[in-house]
Image (tube, rainbow, N blue to C red):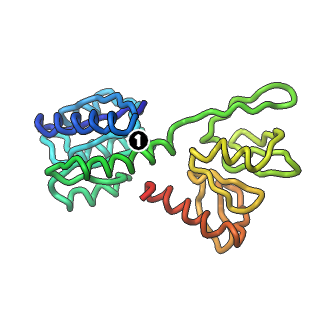
Amino acid sequence: MYHIAVVEDEKECSEQIQAFLNEYQEENSVRFKVSVFEDGAQILDGYEPVYDMILMDIDMPGVNGMDASEKIRETDQEVVLVFITNIISFAIRGYEVGALDYVVKPLTYYNFAMRLTRALKRSRAREPRQLILTMPDGVKKLEVGQIYYVEVQNRMLHYYTDEGTYVVRGTMQSVQQMLEAYAFAKCNHWYIVNLRHVREIKKNTVVVGSYELEISRRNRTPFLKALTEYVGGYR
């Protein structure tokens, strides 16, 4: 289930967005929990980072969408922001606060659904997930977001994380199948990289956290494509 906040001061537009969300759920077999706010001040009051996505009107009285988003970004870097506006120049400013996209009024279901699909793919990539690693002396519960990359050596998988390195038996094929839904991509035969931790590409090297890994000629094009899609929100 995705938790979506709708921040819109115009009642008619807010109801239309909620109707579009209901229609999208039925068509795509997904579930939304929707919280509705009438302006930026309402969502900021006691804000907690519990939303997967915020659909934010920009032009609102009092605290407008841009100001509200700047405040939200101070405590929540992960939530996906999508602006709703009738002035495109306002929407373009949204990229200053890391907005993924914008929807221009008057809303149509086709355009709204297309933007929503893109935003949901980005939300999926950022959802916290856990793996259970079977260790020689027990099991280890590991958040996917903690993993920088996984290396395979002699049918052993080395998970490099912010807590240290964990080694379990397995193959590259098995770990690819396990992590393919969480924005990981192979940079060569031995490494599969968490794209959220990629800091830089230097010629044939990718910088992942504090690690530098070789990008093979064979994997360069698909790896760069995967990284571009991740950074761009799966265009």
Which residue is painted at 49% across and 59% down in the image? 229
How many other residues sit within 10 Å of disc 1, few (<14), some (14-19) or many (≥20)?
Answer: many
Q: Quadrant of residue 161?
A: top right
Asked whether 81 or 228 is in front, the reply is 228
Q: Quadrant of the C terminus?
A: bottom left
Residue under pointer 1: 79
Q: Secondary structure at mark 1?
A: loop
Residue at 28 percent of width and 42 percent of height: 55
Residue at (57, 45) in percent of width and height: 182
Q: Residue at (73%, 44%) from the top-left corner?
A: 174
Decide if residue 227 is on the left or right side of residue 172.
left
Q: Position of residue 22 (x, y in %)?
A: 27, 33
Q: Is residue 57 above or below residue 209?
A: above
- Answer with left or right where residue 200 lies relative to residue 205: left
Q: Quadrant of residue 33?
A: top left
Point out residue 34 in the picture as x, y percentages from the top left corner.
30, 29
Looking at this view, is 171 or 162 the one in front? 171
Q: Where is residue 106 drawn, in percent x and y?
A: 14, 51
